[in-house]
Image (tube, helix red, strand yellow):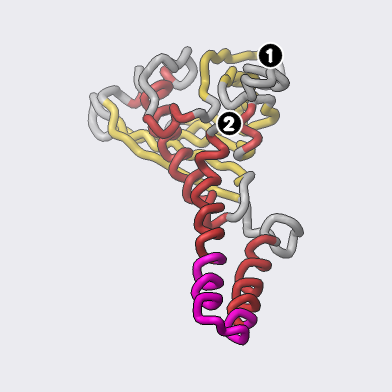
Amino acid sequence: MLCVLMSAPLFYAIAIAISYPMRKARDANDSGMITLRSCVILLAIVPMSLEGVTEFTTVNREESVAASQIVAASSDAVERALFEAPRFDRVRPLYLSAGFPSPVATRIEHDSEETRWVIQMRGGEMLLTGMEPRTGDLTLRLEEARPGLVRWRAISDTSHMTHFLVWREIVVQWQAVDASTTKVTWTLRYFRGLDPAWYFGPMERYAARLAAGYLIDSVAIP
């Protein structure tokens, strides 16, 4: 349903853009104008339809979105909160509740070689057929941790989110404003998975920006 809602305006716009000028030309009974408009429509539509089909016709898929927020906590408290259990029960923005996969649980795994953050995601599956898993895990590896910055790199994702985008890394930065408040910036880097970029790109960036703000509320605030 979410995919239909996202794609429908594009299909309707293309149908109107093709049918309206053609109908006007037919009403005028002008065969030459019909031919001209048909050629113009083809020249406009064909290049757009090839986006994502080949490497040459693919717009850069790398995206980076950030959200910043002033939180009522000291910088030390924010740093501790980043390695504690988040609170995913907080109300999500309406746009993210439309059907995008959402985090339901998480755990941090430590071993002698690395630290991993495993986030269980749910949503976006085909409930009518039951053919797709209801949950999946996004696994992030801690790449860098120092005062004021934590960077996690995505190493696997079995959730339905891969139908929309592929996560690359999460970077969290924080800086004390005063003794009791801290500015937190949450950056999400990912590969866009939908084409065309001019249409789906802004949708994905908007969703990622909302997700970054939600993660600040759920993870960075003690």
x, y percent for residue 28: 50, 81
The image quadrant that residue 33 belongs to is bottom right
How many other residues sit within 10 Å of disc 2, few (<14), some (14-19) or many (≥20)? Answer: many
The local crowd at label 1, few if under 14, some if 14 to 19, many if 20 or more residues have their Cα within 10 Å, is few
Local SS, label 2 = strand
Q: Which residue is mark 2?
A: 152
Is there a contact, CB below 8 Å, between mark 1 and mark 2?
no
Q: What residue sits 70% from the left and 63% below the top?
A: 57
Name the residue nearer the viewer: 57 or 174. 57
- Camera-side residue: 148 or 50? 50
Does residue 213 sit above or below 110 in this rendering?
below
Q: Is residue 74 above or below residue 56?
A: above
In which quadrant will I find the C terminus?
top left
Residue 79 lies in magenta, yes or no? no
Q: What separation in Å lies between label 1 and label 2 (alpha carbons)?
A: 16 Å
Query: Does the magenta-highlighted stretch encompass residue 31?
Result: yes
Q: Main secondary structure of the magenta part?
A: helix
Q: Position of residue 64 (x, y in %)?
A: 52, 47
Question: Where is residue 138 shown, x and y percent of the image?
Answer: 63, 25
Residue type for callout 1: Asp
- The magenta region covers 18-35
Note whether residue 115 is visible. no
Residue 111: give its label. 1
Q: List x then y, in percent, for residue 135.
A: 63, 17
- Choose the circle earlier in sequence order: 1 or 2: 1
Q: Residue at x 60, y 50 (%)?
A: 62
Residue at (63% x, 67% y) in the render = 45
Report the side of 207 relative to 112 (left or right). left
Q: Is residue 85 left or right of residue 167?
A: left
